[in-house]
């Protein structure tokens, strides 16, 4: 599926990632990238820091989030000698390409874009004017994202469901430019959504999300992880009471991390009244610590030695930049008739 293809993933450095982000986005992205490279594809993985400044204005926070994201991907197994790993803000050509794309982006696309519409809806719910607090960065967000994608002749963009529309906008802009100049200046990208990735519930049963404050933290110490897991909602049924595991929150979270055999063991134990809530919480804790143990050590190492990561990111940008330069040149030649 990936042979000879360019695969590109971008991640916004907002919020400190939690277990849901890790299992639902970070780990699958790393696995997909490694698989793509193994199959002879090219994998671009970048930190979308220009996208982050629309919402976050504190430089210290931005820098901290950028570091966390960079270190998490490296700790989780992204191999910068195989994937092109870089920061968006280190590739200035992206912004020149964005400017050219603006001239071919119907304003109506932006009005309909999911990120902008969600912000308007939020304002309406709060009884505020539609555009309250919305800056042009947020409004034109899909065009910058299109430049990220089109700069690298991307074939496949692995994304969550909410981002599919943005990839379609990139495809439409590229199509309009190609049609206007009657040649294939830009490659048309396809979104790729992995249906196997489940939504991880949080400790209160809603989707695990930083905005709900119901997360299991990722790279916190054992004590903090244990505290979160032991505050997962349960009822007052006794351990020896046989229970249907479906719907038991600890079991639901376990589904996204356990092997089939481990899941079977917890399910059988609950059904037979052999496992109580304390025990299944400990099983979940063990699984979480096993999953992230090695990565956590690497993460702590990289955070403490960020100069090494900085060097990797600079190298990544140096390797990735020529392709964006080529695309920009192609566009400028066509647009200005040079
Ligand atoms: P949050 O809901 O905590 O604000 P984001 O919206 O920043 O998380 O999501 C970042 C990435 O993590 C997205 O790709 C999203 O699909 C994924 N993600 C977030 N929460 C979960 C979850 N509970 N289960 C699986 N994936 C998730
Ligand atoms: N908009 C994406 C998100 O919020 C991040 C992103 C920016 C991106 N540029 C991209 C994703 C290019 C894929 C391709 O998650």
Image (spheres, helix red, strand yellow):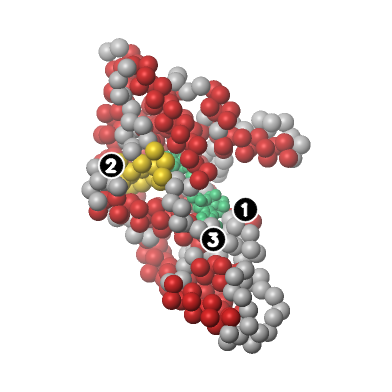
The residue at the far right in this view is 127
Looking at the image, residue 132 sits to the left or right of residue 16; the answer is: right
Element under label 1? helix
Find the distance from the CA under tag 2 to the CA under tag 3: 30 Å
Residue 55 x %, y %:
57, 40
Look at the image and tell me whether residue 289 can be seen: no
Mark nearer the viewer, 1 or 2: 2
Splitting the image into four quadrants, where does ligand 2 fall? top left
Element under label 2? loop
Element under label 3? loop
Of pointers 2 and 3, the one earlier in the residue sequence: 2
Which residue was labeled with disc 1? 211
Which residue was labeled with disc 3? 200
| CB of mark 3 near ligand 1 (< 8 Å) | yes
Of pointers 1 and 2, the one earlier in the residue sequence: 2
Residue found 35% across the figure and 56% down from its top: 31
Q: Quadrant of residue 215?
A: bottom right
Looking at the image, residue 2 sits to the left or right of residue 265; the answer is: left
């Amino acid at each position: 599926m990936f042979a000879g293809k360019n695969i590109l993933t971008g991640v916004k450095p907002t919020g400190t990632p939690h277990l849901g982000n890790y299992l639902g986005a970070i780990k699958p992205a790393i696995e997909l990238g490694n698989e793509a490279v193994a199959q002879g594809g090219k994998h671009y993985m970048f930190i979308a820091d220009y996208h982050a400044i629309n919402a976050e204005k504190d430089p210290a926070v931005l820098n901290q989030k950028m570091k966390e994201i960079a270190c998490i991907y490296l700790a989780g197994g992204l191999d910068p000698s195989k994937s092109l790993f870089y920061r968006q803000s280190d590739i200035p050509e992206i912004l020149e390409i964005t400017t050219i794309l603006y001239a071919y982006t119907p304003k109506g696309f932006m009005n309909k874009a999911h990120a902008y519409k969600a912000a308007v809806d939020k304002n309406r719910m709060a009884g505020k004017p539609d555009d309250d607090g919305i800056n042009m960065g947020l409004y034109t967000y899909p065009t910058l994202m299109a430049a990220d994608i089109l700069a690298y002749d991307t074939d496949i963009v692995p994304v969550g469901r909410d981002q599919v529309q943005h990839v379609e906008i990139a495809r439409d802009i590229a199509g309009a430019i190609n049609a206007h100049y009657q040649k294939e200046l830009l490659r048309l990208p396809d979104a790729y959504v992995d249906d196997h990735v489940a939504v991880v519930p949080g400790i209160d049963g809603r989707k695990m999300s930083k905005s709900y404050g119901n997360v299991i933290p990722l790279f916190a110490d054992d004590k903090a992880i244990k505290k979160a897991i032991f505050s997962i909602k349960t009822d007052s049924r006794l351990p020896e009471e046989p229970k249907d595991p479906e719907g038991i929150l600890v079991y639901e979270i376990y589904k996204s991390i356990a092997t089939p055999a481990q899941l079977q063991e917890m399910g059988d134990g609950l059904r037979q009244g052999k496992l109580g809530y304390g025990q299944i919480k400990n099983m979940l804790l063990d699984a979480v610590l096993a999953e992230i143990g090695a990565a956590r050590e690497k993460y702590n190492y990289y955070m403490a030695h960020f100069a090494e990561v900085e060097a990797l990111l600079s190298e990544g940008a140096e390797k990735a930049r020529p392709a964006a330069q080529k695309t920009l040149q192609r566009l400028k030649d066509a647009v200005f008739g040079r």
